[in-house]
Image: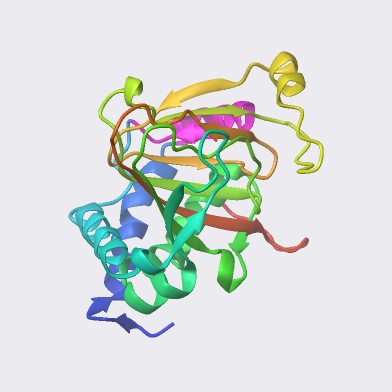
Amino acid sequence: MSNRIAGLDLADVEQQLSKHFRDFLDNEIRMKQVRNAFHQDGYFHFKDFSFLPGEMWEELHTEVHGLLDEYSAGHEATVLFIHDPHRKVHMIPQAQIAEGAAVVPALYHSESLRHFLSCIANEELASCPDSGQYLISRLNHPDDTHDWHWGDYPYTLVWIIEAPEGPEGGDVLQCVPYSNGNKDDLHVWEYSLGNPGKACHHLRGDVYFLKSGTTLHHLVPIQRNATRIILSTSWLVAAAGEAMFCG
């Protein structure tokens, strides 16, 4: 990557992120609590932590909306819903994001952010192939949902750009950790009986980390005309033998 993307100074972004996450990493008690919660649930919601420093969140928010305005009309994905097999969900794939964005690629390729997540996951994370690093999606009709599934990659960080204001609006994630990840053997009720999992409501500006490869999850359907926009960023596990140092 260039040291500058569309006027964005990557060195400055990295410096801000490094300082921001350092304060969290240096709190050993807090890190242990977060790591244990993530290990138990396959999920962690950063609800008591402003995930990005300064004005970076608003810059991300503005950029994602700009990408949707520019690209989404040509990228409607047909998603199979029981009551409406022709419903459209707006998705912006990585190629278009990389072409028109500065903040999203800078965040994804930040060594400080990746290191922070690696310390929570307790294993070294690595970038996904070019087509699987990040994706933007928008739901805005009643009954729109992401049905039960596992992620395509082991770890996903989800950024809530827009969401209904209350849980009755439908932005509630349900997840069941330590399910087998076999997409051809999706017996949700068996996993739910064995491990009830949890339900989590998210608001605009929230960020959550998911062990997506083995945590079965879905989104409770949108209940009214409301908008949910997310940025999903995904990671692999680094090759065996690569050491990880936290702190």
The question of residue 220 being in magenta is answered with no
Residue 49 rendering spot, x and y as whole percentages = 32, 37
Residue 159 rendering spot, x and y as whole percentages = 38, 47
Magenta portion: prevailing SS class = helix
Residue 36 or residue 7, whichever sits in front: 7
Q: Does residue 26 show up?
A: no
Residue 32 rendering spot, x and y as whole percentages = 53, 32
In this picture, residue 42 sits left or right of residue 139: right
Residue 92 or residue 39, whichever sits in front: 92
Q: Which of the 4 image quarters holds residue 108?
A: bottom left
Residue 50 rendering spot, x and y as whole percentages = 29, 41
Determine the residue positioned at 48% across, 69% down.
94
Residue stretch rendered in magenta on the structure: 28-47
In this picture, residue 27 sits left or right of residue 151: left
The question of residue 30 being in magenta is answered with yes
Quadrant in which the N terminus is drawn: bottom left
Compared to residue 2, the image places residue 86 above or below, namely above
Determine the residue positioned at 62% across, 35% down.
148
The total number of labels drawn is: 0
Q: Does residue 131 show up?
A: yes
Compared to residue 146, the image places residue 133 above or below, namely below
Colour theme: rainbow
Q: Which of the 4 image quarters holds residue 26?
A: top left
Determine the residue positioned at 71% across, 26% down.
188
Determine the residue positioned at 30% across, 82% down.
4
Residue 23 or residue 225, whichever sits in front: 225
